[in-house]
Image (spheres, grey):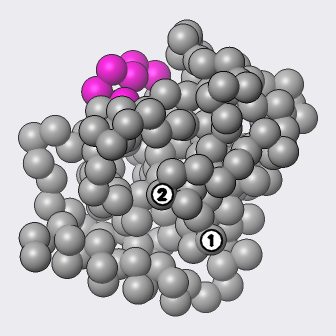
Amino acid sequence: MSVKSELRKSLKIKRHSITDKTYKDDTICNRLLHSEWYKKADTVLCYAALDDEINMDRVITQALSDHKKVALPVCIDDMGHMEFYYINSLEDIKIASFSVREPDATESIKVNDFTNSICIVPAIAYDVSGFRLGYGKGYYDRFLSNYISLSIGLCYNELLVDKLPADEFDLPVNSIITQNGIILM
């Protein structure tokens, strides 16, 4: 088993044991929602969280209430390609491949212009240089390789490590928000 696979396994177990999850989720989301990045963005590229990830429903709802465009990713193949689609409410999100919640690409509008957007990037863990340990399919690395706006990682402080293994195609985020603060790269 590879180093990343072993790390994924151990850090997923650690993430399942996060205490005070609701409080930490609220703190992290508040930091994001009060950031200048969020306030200045017209579009928020978000994700619908898995049960043990930081719950993003509040961010999605608030961004829609703030009249921002909100888009979520749709995995379009098994080769690591994804596209973002706009949503109008949480009800536009359905269970899709890999048991993740996604908008229905047949009923939503695809994002073609990422001007003045921020991208909230999911991960199992981050390191202090902005590199992430994702789920191993490369969806976000492929997307971020062509994305020129701000990318933000949300992470429990317990899952922020000094250094993660990174390959040449792994791309760091521009900043990380934890319940303890904001780290700029």
Image quarter of the N terminus: bottom left
145 left or right, relative to 42: left
**From the viewer's perspective, is the residue at label 1 or at label 2 nearer?**
2
137 left or right, relative to 158: left
Mark 1 or mark 2, earlier in chain = 1
The answer to whether one can see residue 43 in this image is no
Task: Please name the predominant secondary structure of the magenta segment in the image.
Answer: loop
Q: Which residue is mark 1?
A: 51
Q: What's the amino acid at mark 1?
A: Asp
x then y, percent, for residue 44? 65, 31
Image quarter of the C terminus: top left
Q: Which residues are magenta?
A: 143-149
Helix, strand or loop under label 2: helix
x then y, percent, for residue 22? 73, 75
Using the numbered discs, state the Cα–Cα distance from disc 1 to disc 2 in whole angstroms. 13 Å
Which disc is residue 98 wearing? 2
Indicate whether residue 45 is drawn in magenta: no
The quadrant holding residue 51 is bottom right
Task: Name above or below for residue 70 compared with residue 1.
Answer: above
Name the foreground residue: 144 vs 174: 144
Q: Residue at (73%, 26%) from the top-left corner?
A: 107
Name the foreground residue: 155 vs 101: 101
The answer to whether one can see residue 111 in this image is yes
Q: Residue at (57%, 73%) from the top-left corner?
A: 52
Task: Name above or below for residue 125 compared with residue 171.
Answer: below
x then y, percent, for residue 158? 44, 78
Which disc is residue 75 wearing? none
Task: Name above or below for residue 145 compared with residue 96.
Answer: above
